[in-house]
Image (cartoon, rainbow, N blue to C red):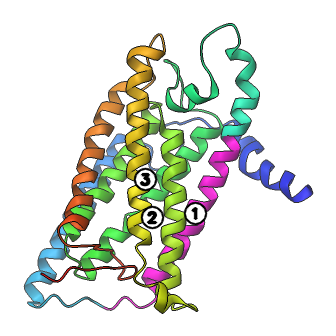
Amino acid sequence: MAAASAVSYWLAEHPAIVGFRWSPTHLWFSTWAFLLGFLASYVALCLALDAFLAAALRRRRPLPLGPVPAAHALLMAAVSAAIFAGTLLSVVAEIRDTRWSWRGRSRTTPFRWLLCFPPGTRSSGRVFFWSYAYYLSRYLHAARGVFAVLRRRRGASARVFAHAASVAMAFLWLEFSQSFQVLAILASTLAHAVAFGFRFWVGAGLPAASAARGAPVALACQLGLLGCNLACHMGVVWMHFGAVGGGCSGIGAWVFNTLLNAALLWVFLHCYGKRGVCDDDGGATVKKEL
């Protein structure tokens, strides 16, 4: 019980978490200028590196990265698990603390709150702290695009754009208090914790890694994540236009988010539909012979 209370305090009740407020002047990487500068630099450098390697190495020979991808996978798995646990505990705490204000004043329920923030919601409090942590983790995740370029993976450019879009979406969630982001973060971090944990297991050559190398874990996680995102988008449409009076917070950013998700779906189909499972670290890969 003491351990559980300590975990709950550090992940959901710490003053820095409870009192969090999204601010472009007091937080790292929180301005439009930084976001746009990073996205432009990231995409340009990755594409330039891809073009240089294509010219310098006529054959598609991957550059050896040693244990770096496996170490990165372990770090991403740990970060994703921490964000998932923190978000889940924060959701429980927020529902516990605000349920009283929903009675008799609105038709808001915990389920509706998860899908549709009321208009005027500000990016502050527990769940937005973990949304900010998720946003920061997207920069760490973007290293996978660099790995894909260095290892000369097919579709590397598409994956670079996918990682850039992921950073932009996480920023929009905070900037406009976008609805349904809580469920999206829970689904995404759970999928990443499983997928990156598996990638580390295979990349590090741990026991039974050889037998598990062909398992489509990354594919299963991405399919589950795509299905969850689709269900959440449909739920937001239903809430905004019919079920909830006044609409949902951040619906303009949600429209842009939907377009980005459509682009990510295209990347998924490009990588998996035509070429088989084109994983970026060489693990859990099932390729089709063309």
Q: In the figure, residue 63 lies in which quadrant?
A: bottom left
| Mark 1–mark 3 distance (CA, rounded to whole Å) | 18 Å
**Tag 2 near tag 1, CB within 8 Å:** yes
Q: Would you name the residue on which mark 2 appears?
A: 140
Viewer-nearest of labels 1 and 3? Answer: 3
Please provide the residue range marked out in magenta: 64-90
**Badge 1 amino acid:** Val
- 24 with respect to 16 (left or right): left
* Residue at image location 38% in from the left, 16% down from the top: 241
Main secondary structure along the magenta-highlighted residues: helix
Taking the spot 37% from the left edge, 41% from the top edge, the residue there is: 230
Tally of numbered tags: 3
User: Which residue is found at the position 48% from the left and 69% from the top?
Assistant: 195
- Say what secondary structure mark 3 lies in: helix
Which residue is labeled 1 in the image?
A: 79
Residue 73 belongs to the span the image colors magenta: yes
Using the image, tell me which numbered label, if any, was put on residue 225.
Answer: 3
Q: Secondary structure at mark 1?
A: helix
* Residue 190 coordinates in the image, percent (x, y): 55, 57
Q: Is residue 253 visible?
A: yes
Indicate which disc, 2 or 1, sits on the residue closer to the N terminus: 1
Q: Looking at the image, is mark 2 or mark 3 nearer the viewer?
A: 3
Which x, y percent locates residue 23?
A: 51, 36
